Amino acid sequence: MNEPIKPIDESASTATFETLYERLLPVVYGYFLRRVGGDVALAEDLTQETFLSAVKTMPGTLASPEAWIITVARRRLVDHIRHKNRRPRTVSRDVDVASPGWPPDWSVDERRLVVALSRLASSQRLVLILHYVDGFSVREVAQRVGRSVVATESLLARGRRALRSRFEEVTDE
């Protein structure tokens, strides 16, 4: 059984966390930006919340800081999507793939894909990301979202169809 992550020791070096923060900030921010449809403000908020959570729960030693922080980020994203599903949502169809705020090395198709993902139902977006981006098996995705494997496979199929359709709707103007 996994041991719970203990709160960070007050005597732990602040410099160590700052170094980790500087190295992993672009990784965490990029992780969120890709998954929230290019919403820069939301990606920044989720990144900040992830690091706040991380500083409170960081274990003394980490075999893989990158894997640990992405796990914290993934949990934060799942919590955000679950919370978002509890309230009405509105999605702007006027996202400009040429607007500032996108990573400069992203192609137009990458931007279109992120915008198309943002236009999906959050349940479809979540299972597509967990399966195709994060690499979880269908069974693991089903466990994480609290659905049966059959229901998750169906949701993935509907999500793929919807994503194809939404991708075609996004223009690169």
Image (spheres, helix red, strand yellow):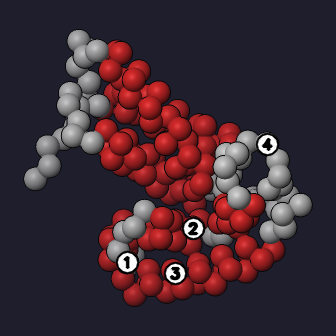
Marks 3/1: CA–CA distance: 10 Å
Residue under label 1? 138
Tag 3 and tag 1, C-beta contact below 8 Å:
no
Residue under label 4? 100
Label disc, if present, on residue 125 of the rendered structure: 2
Secondary structure, mark 4, is loop
Precedes in sequence: disc 3 or disc 1: 1
The amino acid at mark 3 is: Leu
Is residue 64 among the parts visible in the rendering? yes
Mark 4: few, some, or many residues within 10 Å (few <14, many ≥20)?
Answer: few
- The percent coordinates of residue 65 (x first, y second) are 31, 38
- Closer to the eye: label 4 or 1: 4
Of residues 68 and 110, the one nearer the viewer is 110
- The percent coordinates of residue 94 (x first, y second) are 85, 58
- Closer to the eye: label 4 or 2: 4
Of residues 116 and 52, the one nearer the viewer is 116
Marks 4/3: CA–CA distance: 33 Å
Residue at image location 53% in from the left, 38% down from the top? 26
Of residues 21 and 143, the one nearer the viewer is 21
Precedes in sequence: disc 2 or disc 3: 2
Tag 4 and tag 3, C-beta contact below 8 Å:
no
Is residue 118 among the parts visible in the rendering? no
Q: Is residue 39 left or right of residue 125?
A: right
Marks 4/1: CA–CA distance: 35 Å
Q: Is residue 52 left or right of residue 10?
A: right
Label disc, if present, on residue 155 of the rendered structure: 3
The amino acid at mark 1 is: Val
Precedes in sequence: disc 4 or disc 2: 4
Marks 2/3: CA–CA distance: 10 Å
